[in-house]
Amino acid sequence: MIIQPPKPVQWFAIRSNIRCEKRAEAGLREQEFDVYLPSLTKWCRHSRRKTKVQRPLLVRYLFVALSRDEPEFYKVRQTNGVEAIIGTLGQPIPVPVKWIEEMRTAETQGLFDETLPTNPELVVTPGLAVRVIGGPFTGFMAEIMDAKTADGRVRVLVKGLFGAAPKPMQIDVAKLEAA
């Protein structure tokens, strides 16, 4: 029996059709591609029931590993649920392997899990500088705008988001720490 060395791979970002991330993932796995769909765990309330659900972290995006020698872009594009491979001028652009490894590590560490217990030590005061330590905006700096709401969330201005002006959003207190 001859053992083949593993083929070098490159990761590519895939844009799925609307709400078809799971369908695209299943179709790519069926063709034996290595696929990564980062997910966010959160609480969902419906009919007075609170359940834990997993949703895609990056809505409409997932990642696929293709061989550097013979990337099979055609097979990926023809998969049910796949809209396009992200690139410029019709040429797919590889995603650094380091990004995929960091996202997988963060996911296994629970950074994308919004169901974890809250952080009661943080004293919420308007104007306080904080760092986001959980969820999709981990590592970003923010400033608290309002007092904590009944569900344990606060309105903050997240700075440095997409190189634009600070964006207001609501984040769980458990996902913040004093800067």
Image (cartoon, helix red, strand yellow):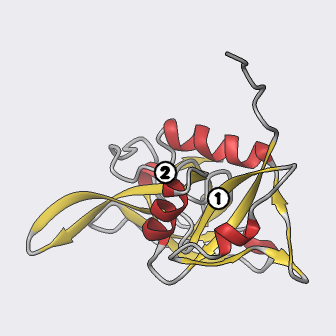
Looking at the rendered structure, which numbered label has been put on residue 140?
none
Closest to the observer: 94 or 123?
Answer: 94
Query: Looking at this rendering, what residue extends furthest in the left direction?
Result: 48
- Classify residue 161 as left or right of residue 81: right
Q: CA distance from mark 1 to mark 2?
A: 17 Å
Residue 85 lies, in percent from the top left, at 72, 73
Whether pointer 1 and pointer 2 mark residues with C-beta atoms closer than 8 Å, the reply is: no
Residue 34 lies, in percent from the top left, at 61, 48
Judged from the image, the secondary structure of the residue bearing numbered disc 1 is strand
Disc 1 residue crowd, few under 14, some 14–19, many 20+, Cα 10 Å:
many
Determine whether 7 is above or below 99 in the image.
above
- The amino acid type of the residue labelled 1 equals Phe
Determine whether 142 is above or below 91 in the image.
above
Closest to the observer: 115 or 178?
Answer: 115
Looking at the rendered structure, which numbered label has been put on residue 112?
2
Which residue in the protein does label 1 denote?
63
- Classify residue 131 as left or right of residue 159: left
Judged from the image, the secondary structure of the residue bearing numbered disc 2 is loop
